[in-house]
Amino acid sequence: MKKSIIALQGDQNSGKSITIGLLFHMMRKNGFQTIKDKARKNSKDFFVILKKNDILIGVSSYGDTEYWIKDRCGKFVIAGCQIMVCACHKEGKTVEAVLSFTEYELVFFAKNFAMSSEQLNANTADAEELLGLVEDLLKNENAMPTLAPLQIGA
């Protein structure tokens, strides 16, 4: 299986952490086993390692600084995660941090943003699509899922 990173890209306060939290709950409902769960107190940010079909998947909502991305994804690499899901901004050092994991194939997934009354629906739809991407990676050992290309720094 090819090692893969799915990076949820969006502006600060666009719902990235909430979306990744929804993804985690969906994964647990769909047969992913939690191996390690680390939540930060008084925060929506967390990182977990899950397992499905003997494949380890790291999921982190930390994405607003280069440090957190490198730290959390680095822990996933050490743990042997084949798939990582993380958050990052649209440009700058957080994108560079994701790109630093050169042994992983990358997919940048654009976070959908909506007016506050519709943001939960947008977050849920994004989480469902992310779950589909992870499931596709688990089924197809040879290729990354196909997405419309997102320009880094767009």
Image (cartoon, rainbow, N blue to C red):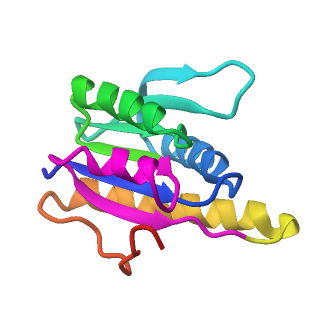
Q: Residue at x 35, y 34 (%)?
A: 73
State the residue in front, 53 or 16: 16
Name the quadrant containing residue 24. Answer: top right
39 in relation to 18, above or below: above
For residue 149: magenta? no
For residue 96: magenta? yes
State the residue in front, 28 or 18: 18
User: Percent x, y for residue 49?
Assistant: 39, 30
76 in relation to 130, above or below: above
Q: What number of labels is visible? A: 0
- Residue 46 seen in the current view: yes
Which contiguous range is marked in magenta?
Answer: 87-113
State the residue in front, 23 or 40: 40
User: Percent x, y for residue 60?
Assistant: 48, 37
18 in relation to 122, above or below: above
- Residue 50 seen in the current view: no
Residue farthest front in this picture: 92
Is 29 displayed left or right of 82 in the figure?
right
State the residue in front, 56 or 16: 16
Name the quadrant containing residue 149. Answer: bottom left
